[in-house]
Amino acid sequence: MVGLQKNETYLIHTVFSLKFETNTESAESIINFHKSLIDLITIKYCS
């Protein structure tokens, strides 16, 4: 995962391989992490 701030935008780039079947199970935790991060940023900077 890489984060980059440009002006008032913060870009998060995550690469996740689904090459192996067992990786699909951990995809949910990565999605939940991104949701939590969006919620945190929204609360901190958009209210």
Image: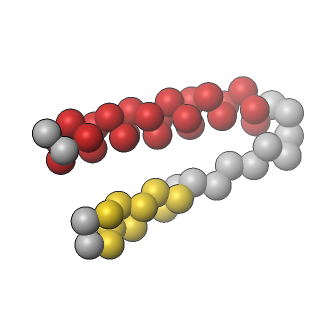
Q: Residue furthest front?
A: 47
Against 44, residue 22 (above or below) is above
Q: Is 20 displayed left or right of 40 in the figure?
A: right
Residue located farthest toward the bottom when viewing the structure as drawn? 7
Residue nearer the viewer, 20 or 31: 31
In the rendered image, residue 1, in percent from the top left (x then y), is placed at 53, 56
Total numbered labels placed on residues in the image: 0
Q: Residue at x 18, y 47 (%)?
A: 45
Q: Is residue 11 above or below residue 28?
A: below
Look at the picture and state if 6 lies above or below 38: below
Quadrant assignment, res 11: bottom left
| Vertical comparison of 4 with 32: above or below | below
| Residue depicted at 66% across the width and 34% down the height | 27
Residue toward you, 9 or 30: 9
Which residue lies at the image location 86% right of the left edge and 40% below the top edge? Answer: 20
Q: Position of residue 29 (x, y in %)?
A: 57, 30
Q: Residue furthest left?
A: 47
* Residue 30 appears left or right of 38: right
| The C terminus - image quarter | top left
42 relative to 24 in the view: left or right:
left
Q: Residue 13's spot in the image, x, y percent?
A: 53, 59
| Residue 18 in the image, given as x and y percentages of width and height | 79, 43
Residue at 86% from the left image edge and 33% from the top image edge: 21
Give the camera-side residue of 16 and 8.
Answer: 8
Q: How is the image coloured?
A: secondary structure
